[in-house]
Image (cartoon, rainbow, N blue to C red):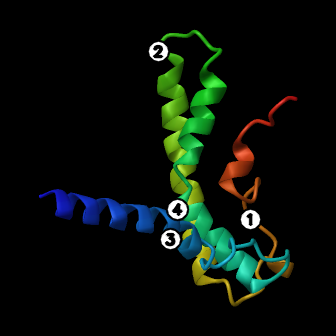
Amino acid sequence: MEKSFKTLMALLVLLAFACPLIAGEVAPEAEIQGEGTPQRKLQRGFLNVVLSPFEISSELSKEVRNDTIPPSWVAGAGRGICYMFGRAFMGVYEMVTFPFPCPKGYKPILQPEFPWQLAPEKKT
């Protein structure tokens, strides 16, 4: 029993020291492509579909200060859900049409271009 415990502990220590070596071999972070490229349009479309639920939290955060009847969170959630579906559909459109330069120069249809740009700026 004691021998198997020591063996298990030795394996755990070895694994703990090997993890940083494995992590160093992972590919570098993905980057957003430059503006005006089909790859950027494809990335934008994919990210807009995947991150479209950010619209709900963005709209809810805008309604926090309002005190109305019905509760303001109902309006914020409803508007956020509508915006979420709009961003997701635009993302699908951009993924399907990414090889074609429409609108001209692969410009974004939605503003802001990516959902994380909806977050308020941190004040330092």
Residue 77 vertical placement versus 19 (above, below): above
At 75% across and 59% down in the image, what residue appears? 113
User: What type is the residue that disc 3 sits on?
Assistant: Ala
49 on left or right of 33: left
Which of the 4 image quadrants contains residue 62? top right
Q: Earlier in the sequence, mark 4 or mark 1?
A: 4
Q: Residues within 10 Å of mark 1 (few under 14, many from 20)?
A: some
Q: Earlier in the sequence, mark 3 or mark 4?
A: 3
Q: Earlier in the sequence, mark 1 or mark 2?
A: 2
Q: Earlier in the sequence, mark 1 or mark 3?
A: 3
- The dot on residue 50 is 4
Which of the 4 image quadrants contains residue 13? bottom left
Cβ atoms under marks 1 and 2 closer than 8 Å: no
Q: Residues within 10 Å of mark 3 (few under 14, many from 20)?
A: few
Which residue reaches farthest front? 3
Q: Earlier in the sequence, mark 3 or mark 2?
A: 3
User: What type is the residue that disc 1 sits on?
Assistant: Ile
CA distance for labels 1 and 2: 33 Å
Q: Residues within 10 Å of mark 4 (few under 14, many from 20)?
A: some
CA distance for labels 3 and 4: 33 Å
User: What type is the residue that disc 2 sits on?
Assistant: Pro
Which type of secondary structure does the marked residue at label 3 adopt? helix
Q: Which residue is mark 3?
A: 18
Q: Earlier in the sequence, mark 4 or mark 2?
A: 4
Q: Quadrant of the N terminus?
A: bottom left
- The dot on residue 109 is 1
CA distance for labels 4 and 1: 17 Å
Which residue reaches farthest bottom? 99
User: What type is the residue that disc 4 sits on?
Assistant: Val
Cβ atoms under marks 4 and 2 closer than 8 Å: no
- The dot on residue 70 is 2
